[in-house]
Image: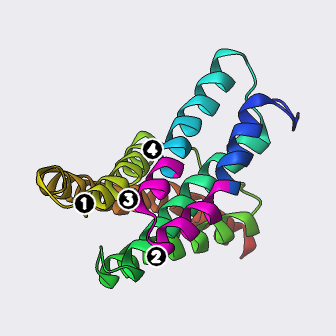
Amino acid sequence: MSSRIWTLPNVLSFARVLGVPVFLWLLLRGDDGWALVVLALSGVTDYLDGKIARTFGMESRLGQLLDPIADRLYIVSTLLGMAWRGFVPWWLVIVLLSREVLMAGLVLALRRIGQVGLPVHFVGKAATMNLLYAFPVVLLGQMPGAFGQWALPVGWAFAWWGIALYWLAAVLYAVQAAPLLRARAQVAR
């Protein structure tokens, strides 16, 4: 694992993070087309940063931190912006943000015992992928006409699947963390 900062994958991840406020500003202004362009570019750079890092041995600790941060920032900003615009219900925001709060608490508890996170597993990656697909397609579903009518149910299908996997991943992470936390509690006694 490299400690280099200025690698092409890290630059792409930095660009993704910098695109979040641009995306949110465009979405809140009602420039849905441009917001979708920024979101699509984010998706392309998300794919490319990982592919380039793995292919050319440019994996870095910074990249491992930036990539999920960028993913979460896009999910949260998309969710909040779309709820603000009335495209998704506020209860959905609460369901997904509750999971993020739960995971933040779990990560903090693990850090207190010296554990730096847990290995990412397929269910978590699949959940994130579904949510990153869901919200742009739901946004496309707001377009008038046949395309919007087709996109909306597809977007919601990705959203429901993503929500279920997101919470399943949280349960799996909690199951992974439980023995570590219990062992630490027994040592502390």
Mark 1 or mark 2, which is nearer to you? 1
The kind of residue on which mark 1 rests is Met
Q: Residues within 10 Å of mark 3 (few under 14, many from 20)?
A: many
Please give the residue where the numbered disc 4 appears in the rendered image.
125
The answer to whether one can see residue 120 in this image is no
- Residue corresponding to mark 2: 80
Query: In the image, is 182 to the left or to the right of 158?
Result: right
The relative height of residue 90 versus residue 45 in the rendered view (above or below) is below
Q: Marks 3 and 1: CB-CB under 8 Å?
A: no
Amino acid type indicated by mark 3: Tyr
Q: Earlier in the sequence, mark 1 or mark 2?
A: 2
Left or right: 43, with 22 as reference point? left
The Cα–Cα distance between marks 1 and 2, rounded to whole angstroms, is 19 Å
Element on which disc 3 rests: helix
- Which residue does the numbered mark 3 point to in the structure image? 166
Q: Are marks 4 and 1 in contact (CB under 8 Å)?
A: no
Residue 75 appears in the figure: yes
